[in-house]
Amino acid sequence: MSDKAGRVHETWSSRWTFIMAATGSAVGLGNIWKFPYIAGENGGGAFVLIYLFCILAIGIPVMIAEVLMGRWGRSSPVHTMYKLVDDAKAPRIWHGIGWMGVVAGFIILSYYSVIAGWAIRYFLQVAGGAIQSIDGQAASDLFTSMLSSTGTLVFYHSLFMVMTMFVVIAGVTKGLGRAVRILMPVLMVMLVILLFFSMRIGDFPAAFKYLFSVDFSSLSGPAILTALGHAFFTLSLGMGAIMVYGAYMPDHAPIGKTVLTVAGLDTLVALMAGLAIFPIVFANTAIAPGEGPGLLFISLPVAFGNMPGGMAFGMLFFALVTVAAWSSSISLIEPAVSWLVETGKATRLQAGVGFGLICWLLGLGTVFSFGPWEDIRLFQFNFFEFADFLTANIMLPVGGLLMAIFVGWMMDQTIVRQELDIERDWVFNLWRAVLRVFSPIAILWVTLEGLSDIFGWEWLSLMSWLS
Ligand code: PFF
């Protein structure tokens, strides 16, 4: 346990470093790749609004709780939960929060790495001139041809996994932490430039209307569940990644303000990515908003291929997407690695290599699901879709639900208040009320309704019980 093991971790040098690391974890493929495509699959406006609401009313309160747990426990999520459960004299079943996070991290990293591999591949494609003057149809063909080459996908998946392990083994605060501090702002600036460019060549009014005009009639139970799940995914919540970073946070840094900054930056990047991508989508009949996971990789090459200096710009863009994914991927495996290192049973090297191999193997399932396994379905999902659904839409929200209940109801409230000492009374009370009552009910409800719609399990629907 943490106290016996002592503080085996380095502490972030400052609150700012924590913000950068947490933002590094939060901003990643979820913002640039996933948000636009799921917004497109779920009809735009109403989905975006629900997503923003979930960030504000559920994500931020739960994030505060997760950071607080981590800072109090000061160790890996598994050991933090041991300590917190001991302190609160809660039943041992609550240890499950830590363990579930470890498993969720493995599964997410397994497919995350495959998609990050696509970004590396695209960096090289752009460098090789493959997207010069490309149109929507050719961009779509280019993407399909990449997917049909299993060997290519395995190669880039492996490369990204090696990159991730390299940083994980070297330790968290060195190297990448420093790089992210410079590269994240560059990514933001590039997104702004890209946004202006796609405004010029694309159909910006249509994109804006699509993303921000709300038509609730297009919203289904599963769409709401996807929005909730994505709020957790994009903020890296519910699985211990933020908890383990919280463990490295200085004692008296204000948690509330810090969390707001991270969530604000994360949301900004997602919206900018959407506003850069959809104008191009609407200006090209060959690209559909509901295109799916290929949306980013089909739409943006059309912009890069047709703008002055597009080759350099495109290369830089995909390089930065890779870096953003990289700084997220290390946080996906850090809960597992830090746990094993703390037990004293393995070094960082051994833990990193061992866990990396497991994720790599699991990732092959995702690779194949874009090729030979495309039609192998569990319920209606192929392997990749199932891994994504299970983690983002079930495990992370359930993890968040349990954290909200644990901090809201089980933990000693004087500790909780003490951890949030800088927060004003009314802010604290509001946060606590939302965390104790609103967040758990909302998460539970949305998850049950979503599942009941997706699988046709009506008995799960609270609505049908009530009516
Ligand atoms: N937040 C990351 C993204 O949006 O790409 C993904 C992620 C990282 C999810 C770490 C969960 C996590 F623990």
Image (cartoon, rainbow, N blue to C red):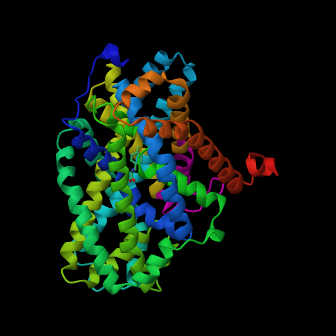
Task: Say if residue 319 shows up in the picture.
Answer: no
**Res 22 quadrant in image:** top left
**Front one among 153 and 216:** 216
Residue 91 to residue 371: above or below = above
Residue at the top extreme of this rendering:
4
**Front one among 189 and 239:** 189
387 in magenta: yes
**Residue 449 relative to residue 242: left or right:** right
301 in magenta: no
Residue 372 x, y percent position in the rendering: 51, 61
Residue 158 x, y percent position in the rendering: 32, 51
**Res 303 quadrant in image:** bottom left
Residue 242 x, y percent position in the rendering: 38, 39
Residue 352 to residue 373: above or below = above
Residue 81 x, y percent position in the rendering: 45, 25
Instruction: Look at the image and tell me in which quarter the N terminus lies.
Output: top left
**Residue 233 relative to residue 410: left or right:** left
**Front one among 285 and 418:** 418
Magenta range is 368-395
Picture residue at 18% right of the left edge, 50% below the top? 179
Picture residue at 44% right of the left edge, 47% below the top? 108
Residue 290 to residue 51: above or below = below
Task: Say if residue 219 shows up in the picture.
Answer: yes
Residue 247 to residue 291: above or below = above
Picture residue at 24% right of the left edge, 68% below the top? 190
Residue at the right extreme of this rendering:
467
**Residue 338 relative to residue 230: left or right:** left
Picture residue at 48% right of the left edge, 78% below the top? 209
**Res 339 quadrant in image:** top left
Figure label count: 0
